Amino acid sequence: MKTLRAVILVMCCLMAGCEPGDFFGFFVPEGPPSNKEIYSLYRQTILKQSTSADVLSAFGTPKYALLSQSKSIVALCGDKKKGKKMWFNMVSFDENELIAKRKYFFISDERPRQLFVAPWEGVDFGCQMILSKEFIDSPYANENARRIAVLKQVDVDTRKDTSEVGADNAMLSLCGMMAGQGMETVLTKLSGSPAIAGRLDEPNGVEFEHISFDKCRLRMVIDNDVVTVRMRLGSFGKGGKLKLSFEGLGEMED
């Protein structure tokens, strides 16, 4: 009977489009780092406080990742599940004081988070940035216009930072492009319906359709000169009970 059940499960897996190796991979530990560890590295960096030395110490000596650096950016990235899962942690510093001014985390998983549940792919992305005084003091027609302008700046900075350290790291560059495409999709929706920007700081953020990831969500909260963004695409963004929390990253399902 047990053998019959196993055969049935494998057949269902094949009919769902999985390779047998992919199916059995669900029951095999994928190895470090876990999503919680990636979230933890992100939380350890405190904007306006953490130095480049603090961040490098937190990243440690990479055993399962690549460390990329430029004059003012440090990134740790890697892949798992035979290349079907990619991730990075990245911090950008003030060039004069070497104090953290932007931080990011990114997880892309091409494997289903649950058997036989679509969409299979998913992305979880978060960042926090210090906005310049000039940007904050700029005049805006209304609050929604300000929020859209801020999200545009987040998109610009994300692409710039990942490009700078991704010049010699194709995986990091690809991850940055995926995050940028998600924000670009939201911005396209907001350009057509600016009033939707009023939902950006709600617990579930703004829901949108992505050409590759189906149902997605993005939340953005502005607190004085600091903006925090959380975006979940595809399988990471499904479920009505999901809250796009910031401080409680570790409590998200792994």
Image (tube, grey):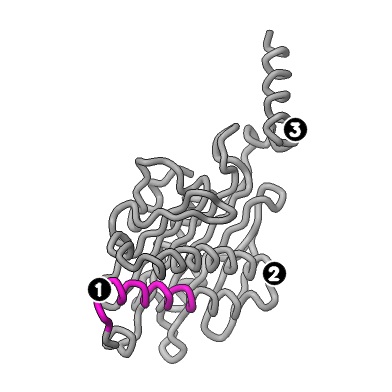
**Mark 3 belongs to which amino acid?**
Pro
> Label 1: how many residues lie within 10 Å, few (<14), some (14-19) or many (20+)?
few
Residue 194 in the figure: left or right of residue 79: left
User: In the current view of this chain or complex, which residue is farthest to the top?
Assistant: 1
Say whether disc 1 or disc 3 marks the residue closer to the N-terminus. 3
Question: Where the N terminus falls, by quadrant?
Answer: top right
Residue 45 in the figure: left or right of residue 3: left
Along the viewing direction, whichever of 229 and 212 lies nearer the viewer: 212
Residue 170 in the figure: left or right of residue 241: right
The part of the chain drawn in magenta is 140-157
Image coordinates for residue 115, horizontal then vertical, percent: 59, 32
- Residue at 64 percent across and 61 percent down: it is 65
- Residue at 67 percent across and 36 percent down: it is 25
Residue where numbered disc 1 is placed = 143
Q: Is residue 225 above or below residue 64?
A: below
Residue where numbered disc 2 is placed = 170
- Secondary structure state at the residue bearing disc 1: helix
